[in-house]
Image (cartoon, rainbow, N blue to C red):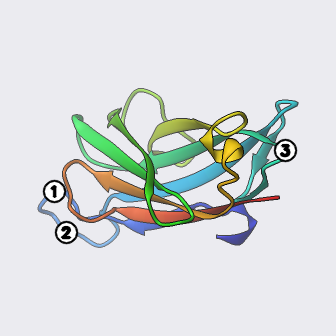
Amino acid sequence: MPGGNPSTAAIPSASSSGAAGSEPLVAIEFIGVSFGGAAMPRDDFSVGVLRDLRIRVWWNVPGPGHVQKMELIAPDGSTYQQFAAVIEDSSRGRSSRRGGALVETVLPVAGTWITEHTLLGTWGVNVYLDNAPTPATTAPFLINR
């Protein structure tokens, strides 16, 4: 995901149409927030500059009532944190320029376990739809010196 391009993946459709081009999509984008408040849309960050990390996930899923589950995987492969959020109906509510529902999770970095224990390296995000046993998409990001 060099250059900050969102990671996009097709996920199994909840509808039975199965027509080409109708499969729901999910996309992940990382935006670092510096101590000065500047937005840094990319996937590699310096721990000395990064205050928070916004993890944005866009969903194009039919109907309301879906839940996003997210796992944040530390560089050593362990689960650092888990999040759950309701996905608003893509046809209404908070939507993005991508035409889907946006779920944004803010991960504090400065002054947390990440900086206190120098958890540097490649991190991972696994994003699940509802109770699916496998991720709808995954994406890496880097926190380094």
Left or right relative to 132: residue 106: right
Residue identified by numbered label 1: 15
Q: Residue furthest top?
A: 93
Quote the CA–CA distance across marks 1 and 3. 44 Å
Q: Position of residue 139 (x, y in %)?
A: 52, 64
* Mark 3 residue type: Val
Which residue is at a point 19% across and 51% down the rendered structure image? Answer: 131
Q: Secondary structure at mark 2?
A: loop
Name the residue type under label 1. Ser
The residue beneath circle 2 is: 18
Q: Which residue is mark 3?
A: 49
Q: Residue furthest right?
A: 36
Marks 2 & 1, CB-CB < 8 Å contact: yes
Q: State the separation of the CA atoms marked 3 and 2.
A: 45 Å
Quadrant holding the N terminus: bottom right
Query: Which amino acid type is marked by label 2?
Result: Gly
Q: Quadrant of residue 113?
A: top right
Q: Quadrant of the C terminus?
A: bottom right
113 relative to 8, above or below: above
